């Protein structure tokens, strides 16, 4: 069973990288709003913002390789009325600049939009320094910041437009490889998970680039085991959609979460804590990157290695169901 | 090793850097080529470190702060016998220990780097430990010019000079380029020498692609008693391959078959040029 062949590529429309959907959306926004300011830390190229810089040279600020400075300066700009997008690799933005995020952005309520590019294990074999497997956990522990991890181009565009219009801090993280559209419905709303596929036997709550492999697993289980799996794109990791979680727990006996994040402190633990405190105890499994020295490989190889694939997710669901 | 042999080593290192970057389909080409000569002199002429003494606390230390130029480090470590060179064929491949930034899973690597702006503080701590224990080893660290925008470097320098770490050698790979463009356009660094001097360092400026000049200056350490040593190594990004030199795209460009062939031809030509006069002398 090759996970790539579970869903025929034609059945889901292919998009561009979320990274490019982000930079296109930002350009569109800047066209009619010269308060939009992009701040970069030698990350203009990695952020696909070279065309933005050429078109709106007055609306891009470069701070050099200095991520703490990036977030501090962004907070200052935001305090003076600018609509700021601070763009840097998610690993540095949420680790190096963590105190600036906590104090200067979140605590001080400066509405900076933090854009974590090449998040999760997008940097593959560049290794742990370049992975952001901690960002949900770190930022979930900070008051006053919305955390969004879009699955496809549509969710990315919507998240960026939401951030531009919001007057509070937002963190959005995504990867750099082309993503298929996970649904045709136009029902994105920050704070509300999207049920992108209905089922009855189990539900997979996924986020970002793990929604697609969850859909692959659902298709495989339907085709081969006659098992119906629901799939949720839980693009907003915080605030968590508790209403939806309760509904899911009532209708699905088996729940599995999957995220491009360490299994500690991310979406899975957030869902588990919410459910247990709401009186639910479904069969439950958290999938993600385990708490170990991450294996070397490309993003795809790392996903496969840790079972974040149609095959891996199917296997876990079959095991959970048989318990 | 004669001076010519040392020069040949740099050229062989460059060929290998390109070979393994090509095999991995990934790498930081320009920065690895700019610091090749620095690593060559450090490991073959200056430092007291080898596979035999690597567990010995009195060995000299090399901490590569600009971790992305890892290919240069891996190639030199293989040449020093820390591991068989063939292992580099797995660079960046599934399950390999050879990831795209220095990792202590690889024999000979002192510290895990890759996020810029960490190596100097690590080096200050290591050099301070030497002073505390009255050990005589030296600590060498290599920084990128773009990297100097990280404030952590300047915090570490304050401490280096506060603790009078004349056993610390900071080498700046001053190739004037970073990812987005020239430092001067991205975040101006100049005047850099007075900056280091005002932080209490003893500063020298050298041609960082001139082996003899590098060696002579490194042998002079400590430049002044009680002061951290700083070497501003004027280098060329992409050094040794004409079309890569001073060219932005080669920061992390990977050569295709044609690029690779051209690059190896150029380096082979430089090798034969070096070997010619040697034959006449005999
Ligand atoms: C903290 C951090 N921010 C950003 C990066 C991404 N990055 C890798 S190399 C590089 C440019 C480095 O330029 P420079 O220091 O001049 O190195 P060199 O020219 O020698 O390659 C950047 C921004 C990083 N590795 N670490
Ligand atoms: Mg440079």
Image (cartoon, rainbow, N blue to C red):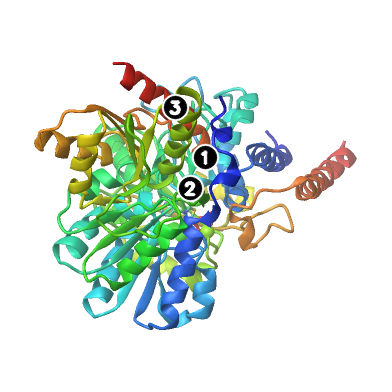
Q: Please determine whether, in this image, residue A184 is positioned above or below residue A125.
A: below
User: Do the residues indicated by labels 3 and 2 lie within the same chain of the protein?
Assistant: no
Callouts 3 and 1 in the same chain = no
Find the distance from the CA under tag 1 to the CA under tag 2: 33 Å
Q: Position of residue A188 (x, y in %)?
A: 34, 59
State the CA–CA distance, disc 3 to disc 1. 27 Å
What residue would you read off at disc 1?
B100
Is B79 placed left or right of A219 in the picture?
right
Disc marking residue A185: none
Q: Which residue is mark 2?
A: B220
Q: Residue at 50% of width from left, 75% of height from top?
A: A53
Q: Chain of mark 2?
A: B
Camera-side mark, 3 or 2: 3
Residue at 63% x, 56% y is B250
Where residue B4 sits: x, y (%)?
Answer: 73, 41
Q: Which residue is mark 3?
A: A312
Q: Earlier in the sequence, mark 1 or mark 2?
A: 1
Q: Is mark 3 within 8 Å of ligand 1?
A: no
Q: Residues within 10 Å of mark 1 (few under 14, many from 20)?
A: many
Secondary structure at badge 1 equals loop
For the residue labelled by badge 3, is the local secondary structure a helix, a strand or a loop? helix
For the C terminus of chain A, give its image quadrant: top left
User: Which chain is indicated by disc 3?
Assistant: A
- Up-down relation of residue B21 to residue B84 (above or below): below
């Amino acid at each position: 069973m090759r996970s790539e062949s579970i869903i025929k590529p034609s059945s889901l429309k292919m998009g561009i990288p979320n990274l490019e959907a982000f930079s296109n959306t930002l350009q569109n926004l800047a066209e009619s709003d010269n308060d939009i300011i992009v701040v970069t830390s030698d990350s203009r190229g990695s952020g696909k913002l070279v065309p933005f810089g050429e078109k709106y040279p007055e609306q891009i600020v470069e701070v050099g390789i200095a991520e703490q400075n990036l977030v501090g300066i962004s907070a200052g700009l935001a305090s003076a009325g600018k609509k700021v997008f601070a763009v840097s690799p998610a690993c540095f933005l949420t680790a190096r600049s963590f105190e600036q995020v906590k104090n200067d952005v979140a605590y001080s309520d400066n509405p900076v939009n933090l854009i974590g590019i090449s998040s999760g294990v997008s940097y593959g074999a560049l290794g742990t320094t370049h992975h952001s497997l901690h960002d949900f956990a770190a930022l979930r522990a900070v008051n006053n910041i919305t955390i969004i991890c879009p699955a496809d181009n549509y969710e990315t565009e919507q998240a960026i437009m939401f951030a531009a219009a919001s007057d509070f801090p937002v963190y959005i993280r995504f990867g750099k490889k082309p993503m298929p559209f996970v649904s045709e419905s136009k029902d994105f709303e920050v704070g509300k998970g999207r049920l992108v596929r209905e089922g009855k036997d189990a539900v997979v709550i996924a986020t970002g680039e793990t929604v697609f492999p969850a859909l692959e697993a659902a298709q495989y289980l339907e085709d081969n085991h006659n098992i119906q799996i629901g799939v949720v794109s839980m693009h907003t990791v915080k605030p968590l959609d508790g209403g939806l979680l309760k509904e899911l727990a009532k209708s699905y006996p088996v729940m599995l979460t999957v995220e491009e994040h360490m299994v500690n402190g991310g979406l899975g633990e957030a869902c588990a804590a919410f459910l247990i405190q709401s009186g639910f105890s479904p069969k439950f499994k958290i999938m993600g990157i385990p708490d170990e020295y991450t294996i070397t490989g490309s993003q795809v190889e790392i996903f496969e290695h840790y079972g974040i694939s149609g095959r891996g997710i199917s296997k876990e669901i079959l095991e959970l169901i048989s318990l | 090793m004669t001076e010519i042999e040392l020069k040949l080593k740099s050229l062989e290192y460059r060929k290998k850097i390109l070979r393994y970057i090509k095999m991995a389909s990934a790498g930081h080409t320009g920065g690895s080529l700019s610091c090749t000569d620095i690593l060559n002199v450090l490991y073959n002429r200056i430092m007291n470190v080898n596979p035999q003494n690597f567990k010995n606390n009195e060995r000299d230390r090399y901490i590569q702060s600009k971790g992305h130029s890892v290919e240069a480090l891996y190639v030199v470590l293989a040449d020093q016998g820390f591991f068989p060179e063939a292992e580099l064929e797995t660079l960046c491949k599934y399950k390999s220990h050879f990831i795209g930034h220095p990792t202590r899973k690889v024999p000979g690597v002192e510290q895990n780097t890759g996020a810029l702006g960490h190596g100097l503080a690590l080096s200050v701590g290591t050099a301070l430990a030497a002073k505390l224990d009255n050990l005589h080893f030296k600590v060498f660290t290599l920084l990128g010019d773009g990297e100097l925008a990280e404030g952590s470097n300047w915090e570490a320098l304050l401490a280096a000079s506060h603790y009078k770490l004349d056993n610390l050698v900071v080498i700046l790979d001053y190739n004037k380029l970073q990812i987005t463009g020239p430092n001067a356009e991205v975040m101006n660094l100049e005047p850099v020498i007075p900056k280091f001097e005002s932080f209490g360092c003893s500063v020298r400026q050298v041609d960082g692609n001139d082996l003899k000049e590098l060696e002579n200056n490194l042998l002079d350490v400590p430049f002044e008693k009680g002061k951290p040593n700083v070497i501003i190594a004027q280098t060329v990004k992409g050094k040794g391959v004409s079309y890569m030199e001073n060219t932005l795209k080669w920061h992390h460009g990977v050569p295709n078959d044609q690029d690779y062939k051209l690059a190896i031809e150029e380096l082979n030509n430089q090798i034969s040029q070096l070997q010619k006069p040697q034959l006449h002398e005999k």
